[in-house]
Image (cartoon, rainbow, N blue to C red):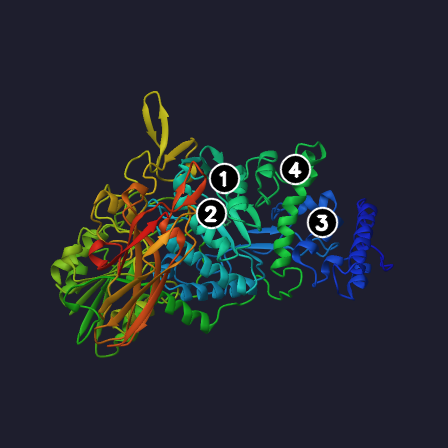
Amino acid sequence: MGGRASPFQSGEKHTVRTKTDSVALIACLALAMGVVSTMTFCGRAGAGRPWMNRSLSAEQRANLLLHAMTLNDEIALVHGVSRKAHPFEGYAGFVPANPRLGIPALKEADGRAGVGNGAKDVTLLPAPLCASASWDTALMNEYGSVLGEEEWGKGTNVFLGPTIDIVRVPEWGRAFETYGEDPYLNGQMAAAEIKGVQSQGPIANANMYLTMNQETNRFRQNTVVDERTLQEIYLPPFQAAIQRGQVGTFMCAYVKANGIPSCENPELLTTFLRKELGFEGWVLSDWGATHSTVASAKAGLDQEMPTGRYYGQSLKAAVQDGGVSQATLNELDRRILVTMFRHGLFDKHQPGNWNTDVGSREHALFSSKAAEEGAVLLKDEDHILPLAGIRSIAVIGADGGAKPLAEGGGSSYVVAPYVVSPVEGIRNRAGKNVRVTYADGSDLAQAAKLARAASVAIVFADSWETEGADRPNLNLPRNQNQLVSIVARTNSHTVVVLNTGGAVLMPWINEVRGIVEAWYPGQEDGNTIAAILFGDVDPAGKLPLTFPRTESAVPTGTPEQWPGGTQTPHGFHVIPIHPSRMSGVEGTSVYSEKLDVGYRWYDASQVHPLFPFGYGLSYTTFKLSHLQVTPTKLDTAAGLLTQDVNVQVVVTNTGRRAGAEVVQAYVKQPAENGEPPRQLCAFAKVFLNPGQTSPVTLILRPRSFSIYDTAARQWRSPAGTYQVLVGTSSALRDLPLRNNLAVVSQ
Ligand code: BGC
């Protein structure tokens, strides 16, 4: 052991040294046998830390370290600590370092649109839903890099994001944190963001697993979901996070799935996650989502957060009395250690701490670029936008003034260094020759007066979303609907800019000329909006979720589906929607819409939404032509296709400005397959100058022509005629190019 005096005073000392000695011996033997090759290895083993040999694999290093760990060491790694017991910087969760073994502390911090948990001197990016509305995976990758760089700069090594659940319920309070309502879109965005985050150092976290689709009663809610729906709708984004994003950690959710809490659910944590999807990282629980010791450990929960209520003394006792085997505990630790080694946590120097200033000019510029790319132009009657040749603008609405709604609330909340208000951004951009007036809209008569006197009225309307509460309905809150109507009545050139975290109803849609959905745009809010309104940039976003026409015509329109409730002898008792944390009753949400989530439901029910999934206008125009699908015949003899399908199409910018179009490919399956009418299977964003033409190639994976067979517990591609539809939104009228494809069994 190199003669180094042990600094440790505890009674564990003797055991540890003995274990480490034997590990070093085995390691040196391995070296001698040619299993490992670094010459410094025995020297380092001699120093007592053979696992620090970087030429070994993560698994080898984890095993060496595991052998050196005592029961106490192993227990300490599988749970966080309270601030009171062990003060730590601002991170949401903390697992102390083990100095004797050289295990670094785990510093787990929130961050969906920037470093969270009250951190200062960071960048507030637009909400993830806004970035997802860009339909630009390269942009989402950069979004992840910016986030990852700032988190790493703050000392974070486990980044508690992204949130990749499907927006099943339009009122969901965390819709803004996620990517939208489609499994494929969410999966692509998740993989892109995770790769970006992890490229900068922190280990990303796929959360919240699984069926975390509403805030109401989230601590006590059960979700009832059939297996095919789980496999086809809710699991694919998580699968992409693993297989394309190589995500290092998962967060199990507060809710129960089919009666069993997510964090002690063997089907979720072992069958799906490890056996079927091949996840090799570690699962940590959402804050307070662990409810047991033995059941959780056996199911495959690796780490309890934020403290050790079940994974501290209780787990130690369970291991000692045999309720949890030593082998099971070893597995939990091994998965944590392997991931830490893989991501370089033992090897990289991380100089920053919670007080490091990580914001930068580059990141502010990126924040604005992402907000511009995610803004969706929903209506532009008579080309009211971009604004041109105007003499005065009335900016109206509280959201247009000093405190605009630039982000959502909850654990993703970011302390913005500044937020540029819309009126400020518009004033700066408009210049001296345009008079810009402002009214907050609380006095309707004053707002109308101002609007009447201006060439154009721009109403800023917002809707607040936060973790912990669903929106009670889809209306704009306060007097905002009335405000829009009154302004529109006095000025026929009225444009509405929405700052919402999801879909809202627009009873005034026919009264206004223009609508821009700007989501929660981040710290550059006003500058971004001004750039879009004045046409410095093309609003190039597309809706990542459907905007319904009415409150009731939505996929989750019955109380049994959302917010759910309990069956009592006196009938069905509906869970009160607000405030969610207060509900003390067990409730159930039934996913009876099955596969018909989001646009799938509107298409299957032939309900016309206000704006379909995938929709968004541009200041220029595009033409899609020359669809080619190759091959057009596929053999499914083995049950499941293995071959990709190439979809080629030509896109032309037919307008007079540069702009971007998102080419979307949907697949319609044969009726016997029992699938929704059509589903997004590929997309690509193209940026084109006026008159420019470009070929676009999309790849359809075998999954696009498959269903999940519950009896066989596997994916299968039934024979039949499939149709590939290509266009610019999920609505049939926007999918002009169609080709058939035959799947045959020879
Ligand atoms: C949220 C998580 C978050 C955690 C730590 C929980 O309430 O659901 O998303 O990471 O708190 O702040």
SS under mark 3: helix
Q: Position of residue 143 (x, y in %)?
A: 44, 64
Which of the two discs, 3 and 2, sits closer to the camera?
3
Q: Are marks 1 and 2 in contact (CB under 8 Å)?
A: yes
SS under mark 4: helix
Q: Earlier in the sequence, mark 3 or mark 1?
A: 3
Query: Is residue 665 rendered to the left or right of residue 357?
Result: left
Viewport quadrant of the N terminus: bottom right
Considering depth in this image, is 213 or 639 the residue closer to the camera? 639
Q: Position of residue 486 (x, y in %)?
A: 15, 56
Which of the two discs, 1 and 4, sits closer to the camera?
1
How far apart, in angstroms, are the residues tagged by discs 3 and 4? Answer: 17 Å
| Residue linked to disc 1 | 262
Indicate whether 494 appears above or below 88: below
SS under mark 1: helix
* Res 66 label: 3
Considering depth in this image, is 474 or 443 the residue closer to the camera? 474
In the image, what residue type sits under mark 3?
Leu
Q: Earlier in the sequence, mark 3 or mark 4?
A: 3
Q: Earlier in the sequence, mark 1 or mark 2?
A: 2
In the image, what residue type sits under mark 1?
Ser
* Res 315 label: 4
Circle 1 crowding by C-alpha within 10 Å: few under 14, some 14–19, many from 20: many
How far apart, in angstroms, are the residues tagged by discs 1 and 4? Answer: 19 Å
| Residue linked to disc 2 | 208
Considering depth in this image, is 442 or 102 the residue closer to the camera? 102
Q: Position of residue 296 (x, y in %)?
A: 58, 37
Circle 2 crowding by C-alpha within 10 Å: few under 14, some 14–19, many from 20: many
Mark 1 residue CB less than 8 A from any atom of ligand 1? no
Residue at the limit of the structure toward the top, as seen here? 569
Is residue 26 at least partly visible in the picture? yes
Mark 2 residue CB less than 8 A from any atom of ligand 1? yes
